[in-house]
Image (cartoon, rainbow, N blue to C red):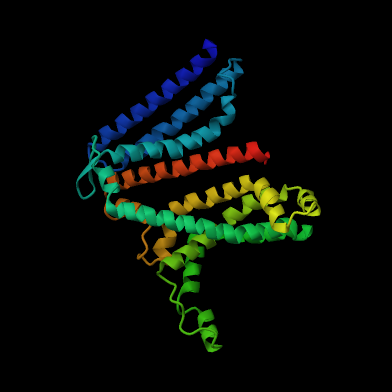
Amino acid sequence: MIQRIYPRALGGAAGLSVLALGVLLYVGIGRLGLTLAPSLLLVLCTVPLYLAASIAFGAARRRGRRIGDYPLSLALPSATYFGAFFVVPTVFLAVFAVASTTGYGVIHYGFSLDAFRTALGSVYREAFFRTLRMAAVGTVLTALVGYPLAYWIARYAPARRKGLLVALILLPFLTSFLARTLAMLLILSDSFVAWHVLKTLHLIGDPPHLADTTTAVQIGLVYNYLPLFILPVFAALERMDWSLVNAAQDLGASGFTAFREITLRLTAPGLLAGVLLVFIPMMGEYVIPFILGGGRVDMAGNLITRSFLEVSNYPVGSAAALLMMGALAVFLAVYIVLSVRSEEQYGA
């Protein structure tokens, strides 16, 4: 038992030591006034350390030594990516969040909670609740549009055309996210040709003036993230045994009852996965409100981006980003609980 725990404890201590050394190096060089040079230096130091650890684990396995019960070599590529592009940037945010500014873009490294107090102020708090409301509404609208479409493709579409229909759903991802949003801006503008055609046919009066409004941002959120919801729901529906629905209807259940008691429950994991894939990026969105909202609809991502790029207030931006990550972690924990519960209850 001790032989199994010792390598893990040693590896954990080594990782924490390297992280602490990186933080000290980051803060020390940052005090010299080299702005973002510590970030580059820490990344350049971190990646070789991960590679060295990979080589060391591989050599240990070749010599027949066991590093715990789980083959860490299988998890090493993902752990390397996770550490280099998530853990290290998160450490940067944490160091910035407890720092303070002494001028425009001048950072004094230390321990101060002033940035968190500012990030919890009325401006950021209102932006967070606005973002939460728009992400929730966008997720519900995406589910109302995407679930029926995925249901129709999985159950009623001809088998030889399902692949084509799924490819058409994925087709927007072949273009840039920014290009799709700009295209939606042209469609929602008052000068779009369709509005003039409808007005000429006396079907509408004046154009609806959707550009630079919250409605435009909401439409853009649903449009851009709809495929992310459809794919996991379609995968769950494709694995369903439709004879269960037919049997329920033969036994006297209505179509809605069979859907609620069988289809919806068996596809709950796919539905929850789709909701998660849509809700989390909507919470961090800043491109869509910037373009379709015309700078008039600020979400939390816009304020965080402005703190970094325009105001150069890295501590406040980092504190707001960490608070946002903490809030999203709560939603992620709820998703995990619901997903595990659905698997235990329905075996889906």
Which residue appears at 51% of the width and 81% of the height?
195
Check the image and report above or below for 251 versus 334. Answer: below
Q: Furthest-top residue in view?
A: 2
Q: Is residue 14 above or below residue 188?
A: above
In which quarter of the view is residue 26 placed? top left
- Asked whether the viewer can see residue 170, the reply is no
What residue is rendered at 59% in x and 38% in y?
A: 341
> x%, y% of residue 153?
70, 59
Rendered location of residue 291, percent (x, y): 41, 65
**Nearest to the observer: residue 344 or residue 253:** 253
Up/down of 35 relative to 4, above or below:
below
**Residue 186 in view in this figure:** yes
Q: Nearer the viewer, residue 26 or 226?
A: 226
Question: In the drawing, does residue 159 fall left or right of residue 297?
Answer: right
Between residues 290 and 325, which one lies in front from this camera angle? 325
Q: Exactly how many numbered labels are in the figure?
A: 0
User: Looking at the picture, how far across and down is residue 71, in whole percent?
Assistant: 59, 24
Residue 150 on image: x %, y %: 66, 57
Residue pushed farthest left? 102
Q: Is residue 331 left or right of residue 92?
A: right
Is residue 215 placed above or below 39 in the rendered structure? below
Measuring 45% from the left and 36% from the top, which residue is drawn there? 84
Location of the C terminus (image quadrant): top right
**Residue at 72%, 47% in the rendered image:** 239
Tell me the quadrant of the picture where the N terminus can be found.
top right
